[in-house]
């Protein structure tokens, strides 16, 4: 047996972390060591609950979506934002947002969270890409359009 996978996570802000799926007990232990209290899982549903979902010390939320290049839709972004807002209302909360590899879906969710909290589009994009070099902004434009449709941000002029 090989060593259990470690956590592949990067802090975006003091309360928001972004990365890949914490699919081992060691990775979940690292989440707890980093003070994470809430986990937003942006992967497609799993046949069995992932370790973070059954950890009694974490509040876990599944916001499932395919990584297929299509629009995530306003319902998906709203679900991500609702969970992030619930976490933000709790004292000393830290939110970990992840998908399978932390490359497409979870960066889009983190981008949306930052934008909804007053970050400009360019600042949110730059921060995510600086903190997680492997992130690709594949869904950032989709996120921006959905935020405008939801009335949470105004369309920025270039």
Image (cartoon, rainbow, N blue to C red):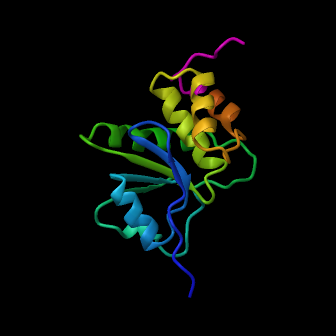
Q: Assign the magenta stretch its main secondary structure.
A: loop
Classify 108 as above or below 53.
above
Snapshot quadrant of residue 61: bottom left
In the picture, the quarter occupied by the N terminus is bottom right
Magenta-span inclusion, residue 154:
yes
Q: Residue at x 40, y 62 (%)?
A: 30
Foreground of the two, 105 or 128: 128
Foreground of the two, 112 or 35: 35
Q: Residue furthest left?
A: 91
Foreground of the two, 134 or 121: 134
Magenta-span inclusion, residue 99:
no
Snapshot quadrant of residue 25: bottom left
Q: Residue at x 57, y 35 (%)?
A: 111
Foreground of the two, 37 or 27: 27
What's drawn in magenta, residue-wise?
147-158
Q: x and y percent of residue 63 in the render? A: 52, 52
Q: x and y percent of residue 9 in the render? A: 52, 53
Q: Residue furthest right?
A: 69
Seen in the image, is 138 located left or right of residue 27? Answer: right
In the picture, the quarter occupied by the C terminus is top right
Q: x and y percent of residue 130 in the render? A: 61, 36
Q: Residue at x 67, y 34 (%)?
A: 140
């Amino acid at each position: 047996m090989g060593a259990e996978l470690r956590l592949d996570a990067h802090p975006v802000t003091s309360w928001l972390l972004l990365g890949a799926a914490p699919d081992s007990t060691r990775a979940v232990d690292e989440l707890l060591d980093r003070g994470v209290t809430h986990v937003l899982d942006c992967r497609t549903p799993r046949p069995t609950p992932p370790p973070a979902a059954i950890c009694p010390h974490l509040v876990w939320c599944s916001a499932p979506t395919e990584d297929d290049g299509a629009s995530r839709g306003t319902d998906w972004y709203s679900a991500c934002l609702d969970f992030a807002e619930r976490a933000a209302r709790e004292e000393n909360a830290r939110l970990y947002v992840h998908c399978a590899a932390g490359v497409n879906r979870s960066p889009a969710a983190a981008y949306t969270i930052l934008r909804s909290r007053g970050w400009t589009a360019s600042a949110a994009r730059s921060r995510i890409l600086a903190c997680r070099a492997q992130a690709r902004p594949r869904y950032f434009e989709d996120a921006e359009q959905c935020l405008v449709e939801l009335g949470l941000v105004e369309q920025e002029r270039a």
